[in-house]
Image (cartoon, coloured by chain):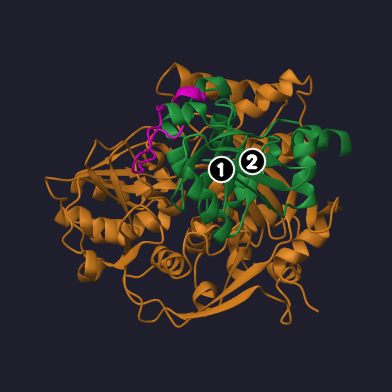
Chain colours: A green, B orange
């Protein structure tokens, strides 16, 4: 099982799409590692720099509704994976992106809007870090001398995929 | 309690229910292209499991960048080609025979009512037009599909869209689906099957139904789906005539898939399309829509006609009907990409290609190309494209470029005027 936690990248907008996460022109790469420099290259958000220190340090992303909409490209979770971002916490996800995350043994965690609002409040603290405990179904955020833990729901299947390390290993044993 | 068509397909393909609410289904078709399949192939090789569950149920095409534009895309094509040969995948379509996957595979008769279909491509929902459950998936789902012939899904809750009335002149399936996405939003159907019903759908050709289902994903939908009827039988008849004693027998068989009258839906939405106007997107999300009346006059640099949404013969006929005897504005680059070689050839024989070329269009080979900014019509920074494709995300057709989605008719009228124009005055 991968580890989920560390420095947080806050992307405060809904409908962040797969073209913004990894533009189509890079889909000609045939190894996951080759995608690494292009993470979130076309995402335009105030104060966000795809090549900045915050992006490089990030291990978790917190965002709004319908995260990962658009293309089926698994290059979107992969570009996170090769940049050591293994969890996205959002109000909701597009189906294919969400399944791709779990299929890769990574975590796509859904929380209600008011809890995402609280987490986004931690964006102001430079030392904010987050731990995502998939087995225990909690997210713990620390920053600016504050700390809080919120619990989340996850489908038992998606949880099993994370614990198995992904869908290929799971399916190969079972089917 | 009755079942929806999606629930019937799930029940008939269920292999396992590992947890409540998770359904592992047997797959009837696993479709592959050169962008999302090579990494699945590489992973299977690395695992020492370079096998396919059933070579007759796997269909593959090189379509996104073809003919290859550089070493990287040539390598992707070669990986898919070598794999198809290695596993004796008979239905593999290479240069000279290849076209946009979601136009090519239906044209070959590969998709049937009641099928389960996956592909590493979000617009796989197109195939629901045939009464199939067809879902776009990522590379890992595709990999498991190739190896094991199964895929896992959540419960197939459906939203039923009853489309009443008749489509006015100049208004097409593309306008209907853009309107519906505008109504429910880009995540209005997430984790839902979009079931299209009513007299408007019944009156549609298979091409129009494919256009309708193609954009289900732009509302977050898992699959679009239509009831397989006489129109479906007629379309598929050349491929199924040896399987059924008569068209009536085929229809009776297909009819079994229809949603029951007492099926339970997550939502039922009713729309009358009789007063609908041609629709155009603005902004960077497919649910940001306006009528052509509101958008008319907006200048464009390029008009792109093609893609899995609107690159079929019906689309070319509609656009050519407007372009006949006219030339496009000198400030506009017109690009036509017929979606398959057959469509291209039929358009040639019908004289449509002459009409496009005399109007000033460049005609490219069938490819996904410009739709996702990979080749054959990428935009420069600040340029605007009127496009019959399905996605208007920022930078989709080229970094800094703007895409306005519309019907083939509206795009043809727009090409003539060099700015967004109402197609109804040309009909």
Q: Is A49 part of what is drawn in magenta?
A: yes
**Which residue is label 1 attached to?**
A72
Give above or below for A91 relative to B252.
above
- The secondary structure type at the circle numbered 1 is loop
Rendered location of residue B411, percent (x, y): 28, 56
A121 displayed left or right of B286: right
Q: Is residue A164 above or below residue B327?
A: above
In the image, farthest residue toward the top? B71
Residue B229 drawn at (x, y percent): 63, 70
Badge 1: residue crowd in 10 Å (few <14, some 14–19, many ≥20): many
Q: Residue B75, position in %: x, y? A: 52, 19
Q: Residue at x 74, y 61 (%)?
A: B155
What residue do we see at 42% from left, 52% from top? B390
Quarter of image, res A172:
top right
Residue situated in front as seen by the camera: B27 or A120: A120
Q: Chain of mark 1?
A: A
Tell me if label 2 and label 1 are in contact, CB under 8 Å: yes
The chain identifier of the residue carrying mark 2 reads A
From the viewer's side, name the closer residue of B268 and B117.
B268
Q: Secondary structure at mark 2?
A: helix
Tell which residue pokes out farthest to the front in this image: A145
Q: Residues within 10 Å of mark 2 (few under 14, many from 20)?
A: many
Residue B386 placement (x, y as % from top left): 28, 52
Q: Main secondary structure of the magenta part?
A: loop
Nearer to the camera, A39 or B215: A39
Q: CA distance from mark 2 to mark 1?
A: 8 Å
Residue located beneath label 2 in the image: A100
Q: Is residue B277 visible?
A: yes
Which residue: 37% across, 49% down?
B347
Q: Range of the magenta residues?
A: A35-52
Identify which residue, B201 or A11, lies in the foreground. A11
Q: Which mark is residue B271?
A: none
């Amino acid at each position: 099982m991968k580890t989920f936690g560390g420095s947080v990248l806050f992307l405060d907008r809904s409908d962040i799409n797969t073209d913004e996460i990894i533009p189509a022109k890079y889909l000609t790469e045939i190894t996951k590692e080759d995608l690494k420099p292009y993470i979130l290259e076309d995402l335009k958000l105030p104060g966000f720099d795809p090549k900045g220190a915050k992006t490089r340090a990030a291990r978790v992303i917190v965002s709004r509704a319908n995260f990962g909409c658009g293309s089926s490209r698994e290059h979107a979770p992969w570009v996170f994976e090769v940049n050591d971002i293994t969890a996205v916490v959002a109000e909701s996800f597009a189906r294919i992106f969400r399944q791709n995350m779990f299929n890769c043994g990574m975590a796509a965690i859904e929380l209600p809007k008011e809890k995402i609002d609280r987490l986004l409040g931690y964006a102001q603290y430079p030392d904010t870090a987050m731990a995502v405990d998939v087995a225990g179904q909690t997210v713990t955020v620390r920053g600016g001398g504050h700390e809080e833990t919120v619990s989340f729901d996850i489908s038992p299947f998606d949880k099993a995929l994370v614990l198995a390390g992904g869908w290929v290993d799971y399916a190969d044993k079972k089917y | 309690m009755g079942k929806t068509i999606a629930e019937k397909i799930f029940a008939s393909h269920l292999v396992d229910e590992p947890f409540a609410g998770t359904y592992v289904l047997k797959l009837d078709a696993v479709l592959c292209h050169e962008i999302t399949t090579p990494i699945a192939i590489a992973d299977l090789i690395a695992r020492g499991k370079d096998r396919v569950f059933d070579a007759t149920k796997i269909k593959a095409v090189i379509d996104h960048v073809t003919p290859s534009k550089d070493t990287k895309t040539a390598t992707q094509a070669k990986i898919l080609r070598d794999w198809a040969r290695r596993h004796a995948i008979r239905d593999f379509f290479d240069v000279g025979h290849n076209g946009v996957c979601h136009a090519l595979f239906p044209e070959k008769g590969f998709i049937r009512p009641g099928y389960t279909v996956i592909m590493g491509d979000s617009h796989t929902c197109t195939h629901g037009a045939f009464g199939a459950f067809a879902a776009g998936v990522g590379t890992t789902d595709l990999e498991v599909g190739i190896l094991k012939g199964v895929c896992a899904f959540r419960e197939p809750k459906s939203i039923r869209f009853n489309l009443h009335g008749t489509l006015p002149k100049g208004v097409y399936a593309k306008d209907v689906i853009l309107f519906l996405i505008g109504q429910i939003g880009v995540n209005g159907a997430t984790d839902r099957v979009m079931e299209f019903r009513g007299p408007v759908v019944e009156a549609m050709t298979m091409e129009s139904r494919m256009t309708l289902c193609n954009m289900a994903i732009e509302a977050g939908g898992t699959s679009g789906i239509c009831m397989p009827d006489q129109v479906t039988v007629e379309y598929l008849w050349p491929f199924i005539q040896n399987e059924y004693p008569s068209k009536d027998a085929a229809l009776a068989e297909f009819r079994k898939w229809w949603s029951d009258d007492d099926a339970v839906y997550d939502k039922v939405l009713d729309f009358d399309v009789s007063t609908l106007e041609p629709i155009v997107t603005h902004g960077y999300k497919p649910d940001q829509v306006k009528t052509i009346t509101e958008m008319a006059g907006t200048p464009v640099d390029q008009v792109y006609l093609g893609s899995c949404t609107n690159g079929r013969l019906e689309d070319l006929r509609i656009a050519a009907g407007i372009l006949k005897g006219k030339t496009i504005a000198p400030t506009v680059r017109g690009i036509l990409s017929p979606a398959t070689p057959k469509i291209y050839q039929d358009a040639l024989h019908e004289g449509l290609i002459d009409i496009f070329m005399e109007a000033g269009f460049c005609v490219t080979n069938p490819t996904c190309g410009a739709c996702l900014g990979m080749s054959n019509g990428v935009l420069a920074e600040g340029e605007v494209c009127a496009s019959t494709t399905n996605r208007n995300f920022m930078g989709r057709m080229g970094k800094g470029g703007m895409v306005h989605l519309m019907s083939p008719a509206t795009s043809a009228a727009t090409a003539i005027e060099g700015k967004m124009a109402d197609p109804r005055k040309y009909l």
